[in-house]
Amino acid sequence: MKKLFALLTVAAVLNFSYLPMVNAQEDATGESTEQVVDEAPAEEVAAPEVEEPAAPAEAPAAVEEAEEAPVGFHQTLKTKFIEGGAGFMGVVLLVLILGLALCIERIIYLSLATGNSDKLLGEIESSLNSGGVEAAKEVCRNTKGPVASIFYQGLSRKDEGLDMVEKSIVSYGSVQMGLLEKGLSWISLCIALAPMLGFMGTVIGMIGAFDAIEAAGDISPSLVAGGIKVALLTTVFGLIVAMILQVFYNYIIAKVDSLVNDMENASITFMDILVKSSK
């Protein structure tokens, strides 16, 4: 009995000691299984994450570059003209239009007055030799230009002598020179008036800027800079108008000088032809 009781006791002890070990192993196995099950979806969820393409990030940069694109010269000029104020800027623009109209009119007139003096002198000489004074006068009537008009006046005084012809040529040459220089004084006025209007606009703009400073009671850099910028725009446009008109004016003066020299040289040759025909 004692041996049986002892065996049962040892078996019971072994059984109780084995159960915690089995439970511990089951718990460890269950935790590892749960961890594997829990971690598996985490890896599966993390797997679909894909980096977004860089194209959308570059789109704003392209938009900024498009916004910072340089503005055209015409648009810039228009913007600055509006910023300068409609008062003085409109007056300066009117001076430019008036000056350009006068310049274009003079250029067209001088272009029509330009002719071939050598060809005209040859036709007059042949007409004097073949048909006399009336034939030469007819040639002058059918030819446009100041040189032909001067020659016609000289031929009209041929019966009064060569001295009278020479005086007539000199007098009528002065008249033709005045016609060539007609309107140049108004172009000079536009050239002088444009920058003066610009300076006046600048002075008035500076006065307005100082009035704004006085009203504000404080010198604000933005207030001062804005007023000065608007004031100086009138001067800039006035100088631009003056430079444009000055280029046309110099061209017209050079054209007039060329025509005057041509008239003087042709008149000398014309007098020689009359002297030869009188002999």
Image (tube, grey):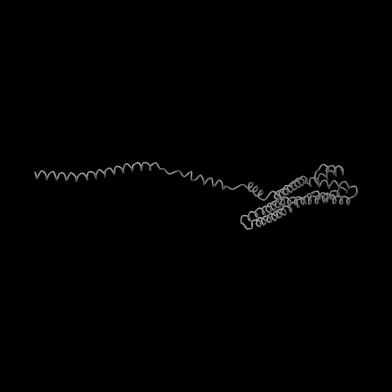
Q: Quadrant of the N terminus?
A: top left
230 and 186: which is toward the camera: 230
Instruction: Give percent across and percent down for residue 232.
Output: 67, 54
**48 over 219 or under it: above or below:** above
Instruction: Give percent across and percent down for residue 274.
Output: 86, 48
Residue that lies at the very extreme toward the right in this rendered image: 160
Q: How many marks?
A: 0
Give the left or right position of residue 243, taking residue 139 as reference. Answer: left
223 and 189: which is toward the camera: 223
Quarter assignment of residue 221: bottom right
Instruction: Give percent across and percent down for residue 248.
Output: 72, 50
120 and 241: which is toward the camera: 241
Quarter assignment of residue 219: bottom right
186 and 129: which is toward the camera: 186
Instruction: Give percent across and percent down for residue 266.
Output: 81, 49
